[in-house]
Image (tube, rainbow, N blue to C red):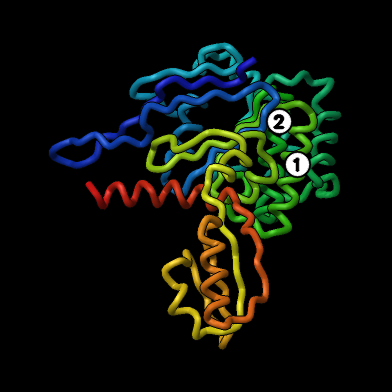
Amino acid sequence: MLAIEIKNLTKEYAVGFWKKQWRPALKSLNLTVEAGETFGFLGPNGAGKTTTLKLLMGIIFPTSGSATILGKDFLDPEVKRRIGFLPEQPYFYDYLSAPELLDYYARLSGVPAPVRKQRIGELLGRVGLADVGNKQLRKFSKGMLQRVGIAQAIIHDPEVVFLDEPMSGLDPVGRHEVRELIQSLKDAGKTIFFSTHILSDAEALCDRVAVIHKGELRGVGVVNDFRSSLAEKTEVIWLGATALSAVNSLLAEVHVTGDTVRGTVQSGDLDRLLEKLRQQGARLISVMPVQRTLEDYFLAKTREEEKEAVTL
C-alpha cells in the first residue's frame, strides 16, 4: 500500500517588482512512499525539500500537480488526523513546560481526555524527557526542543510522520538521540518521511532515499543501489614521490606527504598504475578498495548538473 503518492507536483513563485517573473521552486515532482517505509528526502539548502513538505501539509498550495496521503487527497481534512509534522524551525510557547505543550497539542489533535495524561507521560519518557518536570521550554537545549517537537508530532499516534530537517543544528549527542527516536518510530511500524542534508543520517535510517537539487528529482532508490551505480575506485599508497610524474595521469585524486603518496584510481586503471609504480621503483604500502557513500552519489549528481550548465 502506498502511504504517499506525488504526481507532477509543481510550485512556482512570482519574483520581481515591476515585471513579474515566475521562478520554479519545485518542478513536476513524481514520488511514491510505501506504508511502513522510512524515506529520506535529500538535497542541499534551497533544493525544494521544505517546499515539498509545506505543499503536502497544505501550508502552501501547488501551482499544478496533485498528491495523495494514505489513499486520500492531501488536502482532505481527514488526512490531517492521521499524520504528524515537525517543521524545520518550530516555534513553541517559551513559557510552557513540555507536559503543558503536549497537552495543548493533544487537545488540538482530538486526543480524548482520559488518555491524554497517560500518553503525555509515555511520550516524554520515550523521547528522553521524563525528568524535565515543569521546566520551561525557553530553558531547553536545541536537542531537547527537537525531541519535544517530535513528541508533539506523534502525540495523536499518527500513521505517517513528516520531519523537516530533524537533525539540523544539533550537536553529535543530539543527533544521536534524535536518530534513535526516529528508529523507534520505524520499529513501531510508522511511515516516516524526513528531509535532510546530513547524508550519514539518511544512510543509517532510510529504506530508500530521493535526491532533489534545484527543485528537480535527481534519483530515487535504495542506498546500496546508489553506491553501486558509481564507478569503483581503489586507494593506493606508496613510497616514492618521484614516481608521481609517471602515473599522475591515471590518478583521480592524489595527496603527497613527504615521500609518501596516496592516490585514488579508477579500478579499471589499477593494473596499469601498479605496473608503472613497479617500473619507477616505488615501494608499495597498501591497495584498498574505496567504500562509496551516499555523499559520493549526491556530489556526483550535483556536479553533473553544474557541468551541463557550463556546457549550455
114 or 246, nearer to the observer:
246
Please give the name of the residue rendered at 44% of the width and 35% of the height, measured from the top-left corner: 217
Q: Tag 2: residue type?
A: Ile
On screen, 34 above or below 311? above
| Residue in view at x 65 percent, y 67 percent | 287
* Viewer-nearest of discs 2 and 1: 1
Q: The residue under label 1 is which amino acid type?
A: Leu
Residue 149 marker: none
Pick whichever, 148 or 246, lies toward us. Answer: 246
Residue at the disc numbered 1: 181
Outermost left residue: 18
Q: Nearer the viewer, residue 304 or 31?
A: 304
Residue at 46% over, 32% down: 52
How far across and down, in percent of the image, does residue 177 sit?
A: 75, 50
Quarter that holds the N terminus: top right
Image location (x, y in percent) of residue 179:
72, 46
Q: CA distance from mark 2 to mark 1?
A: 11 Å
The reply to whether discs 2 and 1 touch (Cβ–Cβ < 8 Å) is no
